[in-house]
Image (cartoon, helix red, strand yellow):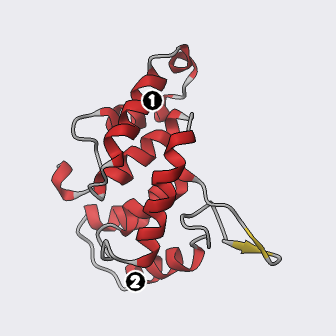
Amino acid sequence: MTLLASKAWLRESPRVLTGVEMLRDRACTAGGWNAGNSVVFGVHLDPHPDFTAMALLALRAFVSDADPFVEKGLTYLGGRMRSLTSPYSLAWTVMALAAYDSDAAAACQERLSACLHSDAIDRMPVPALALCALAIETPPFTFQKDDQ
């Protein structure tokens, strides 16, 4: 999130490079990211869609679309979105896929809209509901300059 804030506030800092390198270091071997390290006690941990989407959005302004970490993360999200049922994870996934102009963004946005028409919306925390509102906008909010 610090990388997104740095970009939004147009603040340059040598620590941005450190943040990018940290995300690269924490990338899971299967593609994507989780909430911490990618390997613990020699065990490769699984990525999570919400953290993968957040990392991809953060990296968007600082690395090329052809970056291997970005490509693996997008591949992971594209495959994983078909089985997602959490509106929170779907919202993050929509925004990340849209930021990279992925063809899968529209299908993911449809899945999110379908989830929001259920009675689960009444039990959603307000921050998650706000995130979903940003994701179902046309075009989805992506934390990129074009969104402003």
* x and y percentages locating residue 129 in the rendered image: 45, 29
Residue 17: assigned label:
2
Name the amino acid, label 2: Leu
* x and y percentages locating residue 61 in the rendered image: 29, 69
Disc 1 to disc 2, C-alpha distance: 32 Å
Image quarter where the N terminus lies is bottom left
Q: At 38% from the left edge and 60% from the top edge, which residue is drawn?
A: 57
- Asked where in the image residue 33 lies, by quadrant, the reply is bottom right
Q: Residues within 10 Å of mark 2 (few under 14, many from 20)?
A: few
Name the amino acid, label 1: Leu
Q: Residues within 10 Å of mark 1 (few under 14, many from 20)?
A: some
Q: What is the secondary structure assignment of the residue under circle 1? A: helix
Q: At 31% from the left edge and 40% from the top edge, which residue is drawn?
A: 106
In the displayed structure, would residue 131 be above or below residue 49? above
Q: At 40% from the left edge and 83% from the top edge, which residue is drawn?
A: 17
Q: Which residue does the numbered mark 1 point to in the structure image?
A: 129
Q: At 41% from the left edge and 38% from the top edge, which residue is drawn?
A: 131
Q: Nearer the viewer, residue 20 or 106?
A: 106
